[in-house]
Amino acid sequence: MDKVKVGRISYLNVLPIYYPLESGLIANDFEFVYGPPAQLNKMMSEGLMHIASNSSIEYLRHAEQYLLLPDLAIGSRGPVQSVIMISRKPLEQLKGCNVLVSAQTHTSAALLKILLSEYIPLNATYETGNATERLESGEKPEAILCIGDEALNLRKHAEYPYIFDLGEEWIRWTGLPFIFGIWTVRRDAAHREDVKQAVRDLIRAKEWGQANIEKICEMTADKTMLNLEESRSYYDGLVYDLGKTEIEGLKVFSKYLLKTGQIDHIPELEFLDI
């Protein structure tokens, strides 16, 4: 039987979950597969992995292929800092603007479309591209949706002083946390005991990360563009649980996805029994 293949987003926000596994603090027999959310979504749908951290919208669009892992997510309960729209003009001057959207994201792009149509109607248009490459080439898009480590790098860009933090705006609008990603297991692998053990290991790793978040902050400050204070602020705004409040946020997101035509039905949320 092949090793359990686990998709791992290559972003700082999941370090509290994966550090104890990758460092050997929590024993495991995983084969990690690294990549941005959009790539992992595709690989998971093609059956190239057993478990992955998927975009929320990927699960909602293809729930028939997956089961959710219990109480494991990546989301925000306020400013998320790594999912932002940066712009050269204030929001009120962006009516009809064109937004350059990172090709790495599905959920964040869907959320931005909801926020800029249902919450603050700007009648924006969208194009997909690489923000860093476009900026380095001398282009200056009106507004840019950037995620992950790229967002952490670009949030202080001198020519883009205005920041629209999607996590912050969502909770201001709905009062609920926003779940950007969830962990799923393919239904055709859910019967395997080694897969269920991998799920238990992932949940243990999350609990270790939450209990040792100061160590994670120190590691982040040592190896990234964030200092210790910024690291603490960053991780403090993130959510790793998938409890009642987080599930309610996910359900509200699914209702707006349906309203805006980004999904064709709202699936039942089904969890793996471990």
Image (tube, rainbow, N blue to C red):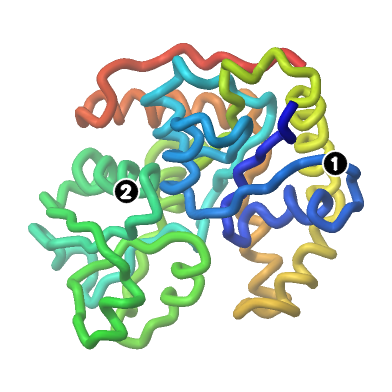
> What residue is drawn where x is 14% and y is 62%?
98
Q: Quadrant of residue 246?
A: top right
Q: Is residue 266 left or right of residue 274?
A: left
Disc 2 from disc 1: Cα separation: 34 Å
Rendered view: 120 above or below 220? above
**Badge 2, how many Cα within 10 Å: few under 14, some, many 20+?**
many
Left or right, 177 with respect to 110, comes to: right
Which residue is more in the foreground, 172 or 17?
Answer: 17
* Residue 82, above or below 21: below
Depth-wise, is mark 2 or mark 1 nearer the camera? 1
Helix, strand or loop at mark 2? helix
Residue 22's spot in the image, x, y percent?
79, 54
In percent of width and height, residue 72 lies at 67, 34
**Residue located beneath label 2 in the image:** 109
Any mark on residue 28, and which?
1
Between residues 98 and 223, which one lies in front from this camera angle? 223
The mark that comes first in sequence, 2 or 1, is 1
Residue beneath the point at 30% across and 48% down: 112
Residue type at mark 2 is Ala
Residue drawn at the location 23% of the way across and 48% of the way down:
116
Callout 1: SS: loop
Report whether residue 178 is seen: no
User: Which quadrant is home to the N terminus?
Assistant: top right
The spot of residue 144 in percent (x, y) is: 28, 66
- Decide if residue 176 is in sight here: yes
Give the amino acid at mark 1: Asn
From the viewer's perspective, is 27 left or right of 21?
A: right
Horizontally, residue 164 falls left or right of residue 54, namely: left
Rendered residue at 53%/21% (across/down): 66
> On screen, 18 above or below 267?
below
